[in-house]
Image (spheres, rainbow, N blue to C red):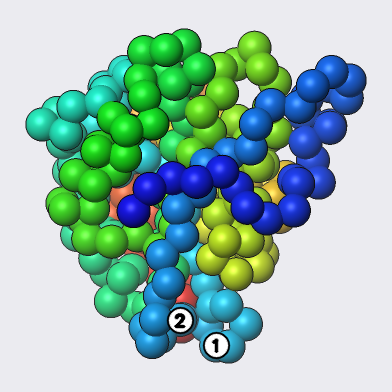
Amino acid sequence: MEFTPEYLEPLPTADRWSGGGGPRPSAPWVVVRDAGGRRAAGGGDGGVAVLFDRDAVLIEDIAYNGDPGRVYPRPGARRAVGELRELGVRLGVLTEQPGIARGVLTRRRVEIVQHRIEELFGPFDAWALCPHGPAERCGCRAPAPGLVLAATRALRVRPARTTVIGGTAAGLVAAAEAGAHGLLVPTAVTRPGEISAAGHRRAADLGGAVRLVVAGGSVR
């Protein structure tokens, strides 16, 4: 499966996060997989979804990585993803890849890494990728909510029934701005202030985050 530009209506928050004037950056890139007959948890309104930050949450964070041989799952990540998949939860991946804007990565190299991740974890229902650099002030790079909105709309799941599991405070802000729930899983680059500010919205690792999601009852 290949990334294509976000095919839905323009994101309603784009002007706010881009500062208003000037040309608007290109859309986030989205991959959506037809779930077919797989049961969606939570009923007939699209069910519920969990969106994972790719780097440092699902896999080790290696800057500008376009090599599938350097994709290393985080400890316990495959088991955590598998638990949610067995419950019928719609699963998505969010990733910011400014290396594309800087010419360090190509779309093809990112897609090759994506395929390797799915070899290791199994298929995800949606991927949403921001290919912009920080200076472009796009509407999809956290703390803007564009990636979360793109993924939830592609999955046809309401943001209020979506949990975003990420490694930074910016990810929690993006989730809140989109109307979704956020859980912090601290990484090597998460600042102490971000951890304390997250309060009860955090877990020590991905397995703990999944247990919080399940204990909250939203996947039943």
The residue carrying mark 1 is 43
Residue 174 placement, left or right of 18: left
Q: 7 or 189, which lies in front? A: 7
**Residue at 76% from the left image edge and 27% from the top image edge:** 24
- The disc at residue 40 is 2
Q: Position of residue 213 (x, y in %)?
A: 45, 64
Which amino acid lies under the numbered mark 1 shown in the image of this protein?
Gly
Which amino acid lies under the numbered mark 2 shown in the image of this protein?
Ala
- The disc at residue 134 is none
Q: Quadrant of residue 46?
A: bottom right
Indicate whether 28 appears above or below 1.
above
Indicate whether 63 appears above or below 90.
above
Q: Position of residue 80 (x, y in %)?
A: 26, 59
**Residue at 64% from the left image edge and 37% from the top image edge:** 27
Q: Secondary structure at mark 1?
A: loop
**How many dots with numbers?**
2
Pointers 1 and 2 in contact (C-beta within 8 Å): yes
- State whether residue 19 appears in this view: yes
Residue 192 placement, left or right of 69: right
Q: Residues within 10 Å of mark 2 (few under 14, many from 20)?
A: many
Q: Secondary structure at mark 2?
A: loop
Q: CA distance from mark 1 to mark 2?
A: 7 Å
- State whether residue 52 appears in this view: no
Indicate whether 152 appears above or below 167.
below
